[in-house]
Image (spheres, helix red, strand yellow):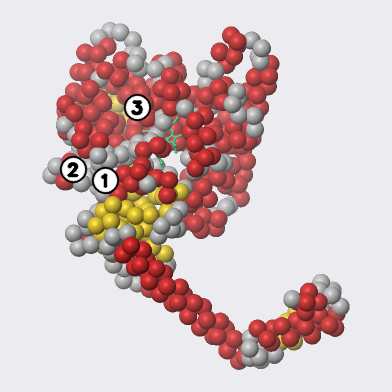
Amino acid sequence: MESYNNTFGSERNSSESFSHLVELASSQLVVLHSQKPSNGDLYLLHIRNFATVKALALTILLILICKIIFSQLSWKNETKALEKRYGCKEPSHLKTHWFFGIDKPLQVLAAGKEGRVLHYFRSLVAEAGNTFEWTVLGSRVWGTQDPENIKAVLSTREKYFSHEVRREVLCTLIGDSIFTQDGASWRHSRALLKPSFFQKHCTNSTLFEEHVDNLIARIRCDSTVDLQPFFFSLTLDVTSAFIFGKSVYSLTPSQTEEEAEFSRAFQYAQVYLSKRYQLGRLCWLLNGKEFRESCKTVHTYVDQIVDNAMQEKARIALDPDCIQASKQNLLGELVFDVSDPIQARAHLMHLLLAGRDTTAGLLSWTMRLLSRYQGVQSRVRDEIEATFESDPIDVNKTKDMPYLTCVLKEVLRLYPSVPVNSRTAAEDVVLPVGGGEDGKSPVLVRKGEDVAVCVYSLHRRTDLYGSDADAFRPERWENGALDHVEKSYGYLPFHGGRRVCPGRQFALAEASYTIVRLLTAFPKLNVPAGTTFPEVGMEKQILGLTLSSADGCVVEMSR
Ligand code: HEM
């Protein structure tokens, strides 16, 4: 240690000691010569004997390989001992064929390019069973579409799992709040962003009305239109109005430059985040200039809104009537509980991210399917007529439309907005099934391993939904026929357990209201003439942070 410190001390001594240290470290294999450069800042190491360096490199490589083999062996022994202690059996193993199992990630990439990544995941499940593991680059990863295991991950053993990877991927844009937190900090955020608040607001038609009016005004009658980008704008406008108390009005020409800049930057950063997600723990490799600038634009815009709300809170502090009025949006309520503006921004950003693309996806898939399945569309139209007659459309009444509810349930079954989700084991943890020949014994997930919960393939299991599980048939939900599946973790568009989506009712209210308004404004909705509609599940899909259609939602709308 002393000689190392001396390296930065006197010129002659340090040079000698450094060489001595290197010699020792390399077991006297090489002699390295160091000398002080002319500028006096750095020591340049001159390598005299190339062959000896090669020998050193080989020795290091050999040591590394031995270390890896040794740690793999002791990991295997430890795993076997723990499996024995907890009565676990070996899980089904997904076979990989290339070095370090890289054939599978390459196949995922190829399937992603073709818009068929979820289709590919289903083929893995078909090959390896309902719960399986595979090893990629030396790390074990799990996949499950087993309701019992999913229940354990999301509910009964939820505390043994963390959102580590998600935090690393998302925090640059959205900060740390409900979506990325675990333990006490998550409990705190969840208590602040109360589900009751979402429920209170989703009964208010005025929150949706103005923005759906703007949407309808943008659709030219008797035309072929791609509704998907409009739905992304609609849900951005509604969610921003709901959380900021001020919409960004992306559907109107009157949008200010600042609002337009925010919308653009948020859109860019969100798409970028989904690319970071694909890299998982290596997400730090993607941190481009435009992404960083977009994050900055988004933060500046939201910080201004937070700042205004905090000033407003200080101004009305003593007036109970004003306080009540200011609590009409989420931020107005939040500033009474959160004094740190950066934390307030994080809470808002999490809601914006969680509430926007998910609902836009639901709307897109629904309108696509309604244009294709005319029988379903006409039943929804009949229900609209029976429910509203000539009354104005009220969001509260859409809850009393059982057939529309079944349609939305069926869309979310086939196209869950969050089709695959993953958690990281924070401890060694036992999952109830998936081990042994029959897959009925418990399995052991080791600390640090990721478990992918495959909701997409779960929702298409024929043993849960019948032989026509791949078909779009809303009637399957009628009269509570699938209540037992819902109750037993077989249907999870909003997930379950303590972290179940708090925006569920808000999203369903927004989607129902928008669909009813669109079908009322445009009595004809069709697949454009000459277009072939692919089989359900065979369409091109984009798996970003949420699931969307790669071909958009192109429909023909007329009065
Ligand atoms: C169709 C629309 C929606 C779907 C399918 C959906 C689905 C989900 C799912 C699956 C999760 C769990 C994610 C996980 O634990 O990894 C979740 C969480 C969450 N969702 Fe939604 N969501 C929707 C709309 C919304 C809306 C409109 C909001 C709010 C405005 C919202 C707010 C949240 C929040 C805050 C969480 C995090 C909950 C927690 O971790 O405690 N969601 N959502």
Spatial CA distance of label 3 from label 2 is 24 Å
Quadrant where the C terminus sits is top left
For disc 2, the marked residue is 464
For the residue pair 375 and 121, the one nearer the viewer reads as: 121
Q: Is 223 on the left-hand or right-hand side of 172?
A: left
Q: What kind of residue is marked 3?
A: Leu
Spatial CA distance of label 3 from label 1 is 24 Å
Specify the quarter for ligand 1: top left
Which structural element holds mark 3?
A: helix
Q: Is 132 on the left-hand or right-hand side of 510?
A: left
CB of residue at label 1: within 8 Å of ligand 1? no
CB of residue at label 2: within 8 Å of ligand 1? no
Q: What kind of residue is marked 1?
A: Pro
CB of residue at label 3: within 8 Å of ligand 1? yes
For disc 3, the marked residue is 508
**Does any portion of residue 257 appear in the rendered image?**
no
- In the image, which disc is placed on residue 147? 1
